[in-house]
Amino acid sequence: MKFAVLGAGSWGTALAMQLARNGDTILWGRDQAAMAAMQQTRSNERYLPGIRFPGKLIVEANLEQAISHCEAVLVVCPSHAFGDILKKIKPLLGDRPLAWASKGFEPGTGRFLHEVADEIIGDQVPMALVTGPSFAKDVAMNKPTLVAVASSHKEFAKQVSWALRSDNFRAYISEDVIGAELGGAVKNVLALATGIADGMQLGDNTRAALMTRGMAEMMRLGEALGCKPETLMGLSGLGDLVLTSTGDLSRNRRMGLALGRGESIESAKQTIGQVVEGIGTTDEVMRLAKKHDIDMPITEHVWKVVHGELTTVEALTALMGRDLRPEFD
Ligand SMILES: NC(=O)C1=CN([C@@H]2O[C@H](COP(=O)(O)OP(=O)(O)OC[C@H]3O[C@@H](n4cnc5c(N)ncnc54)[C@H](OP(=O)(O)O)[C@@H]3O)[C@@H](O)[C@H]2O)C=CC1
Ligand SMILES: O=C(CO)COP(=O)(O)O
């Protein structure tokens, strides 16, 4: 199946490279000059410097051309741009199936990306999402990686997983779309939390505690939303939480590290220079937690730090001072 990958940031480029290890794959990005440079150097020097594209990766700066020459579309943009891109491609899509690999919620509404896709594209075509513990750089460098492909269309999920499959890449399929999306979003907030703790040099015990109790928050919210617990304990939940809470390639973790050292969000954003989904996701997870009356203290205190209501030290003191309770309710 020939994919057009829409979004030529680090993850779109890495996924296009992975697909191109198996066959012709189109990579589209909105920046004409950047796409011309990619075609010339056969690499994405801005986001993945020094890593050369496979021969079967086709660089395309024209959106209509990209879609008309593909059999399926994979959208890999930041979550805030997801709805806009879908509106743009809807008239071009025809009966081509649609996948995405963005992680997060629609800003301002807290809607899952599959809800946004359902509203804009409807049941016109099969849809799937790719998620799980996968740093773009490692995938681009062909390091062994496992992801999950979630879809209510089992056949399309299988097609996506086969298109991605290689000696160093495996994609497991799942039918739990909400669970897969929830894990990939909430872990961004928890990567901020563990990053903050590490930036404050609180030590290994604190990181383990935040990951474990953060996982409990994810499970509580997941239960309220009807997710399968095993999805959250799998690649798209726990797997991605471990990766982004411990791996310094994570932009969310690096944002947390900066906040923990006392830097501002704006200055950390400048230094990171790429999308940090967790800042917006914190708002949307809090919105969901309130709507479903779920206690998510770590998320709540990350929210308070991000919004300047508490310093990192005050947030730590408040979390450590909570009433004692059973580990499992
Ligand atoms: N990087 C990673 O390791 C992983 C990322 N993800 C997820 O993938 C998504 C994309 O992240 P990533 O590629 O890393 O982000 P980057 O910051 O590396 O790149 C973002 C890309 O999106 C493009 N973009 C931004 N707004 C629009 C728009 N309105 N229309 C079209 N393109 C747009 C940017 O274009 P321009 O360069 O012109 O600004 C840029 O190419 C995020 O949701 C992220 O959480 C998931 C798994 C792994
Ligand atoms: O989702 C990711 C890896 O699975 C990337 O995480 P960051 O967005 O924190 O870099």
Image (spheres, helix red, strand yellow):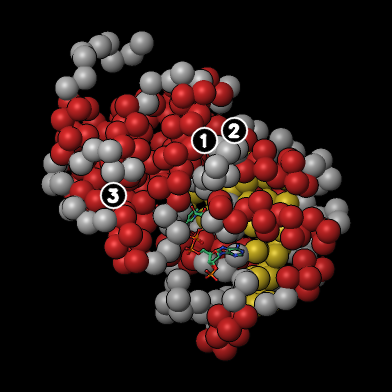
Residue appearing at x 71%, y 54% in the figure: 86
* Residue that carries the numbered disc 1 in the rendered image: 182
**Residue 123 visible to the viewer:** yes
Which amino acid, mark 3? Gly
On the image, the x and y values in percent for residue 79 come to 56, 51
**Residue 14 visible to the viewer:** no
Quarter of the image where one finds residue 238: top left
Of residues 74 and 302, the one nearer the viewer is 302
- Contact (Cβ within 8 Å) of mark 1 with mark 2: yes
Which amino acid, mark 2? Ile
On the image, the x and y values in percent for residue 96 come to 81, 55
Q: Secondary structure at mark 3?
A: helix
Of residues 155 and 298, the one nearer the viewer is 298
Residue appearing at x 81%, y 40% in the figure: 123
* Residue that carries the numbered disc 3 in the rendered image: 256
Which amino acid, mark 1? Leu
On the image, the x and y values in percent for residue 32 come to 62, 80
On the image, the x and y values in percent for residue 1 come to 75, 59
Residue appearing at x 86%, y 56% in the figure: 94
* Residue that carries the numbered disc 2 in the rendered image: 178
Q: Nearer the viewer, mark 2 or mark 3?
A: 3
Cα separation between marks 2 and 3: 26 Å
As drawn, the residue found furthest toward the right would be 94
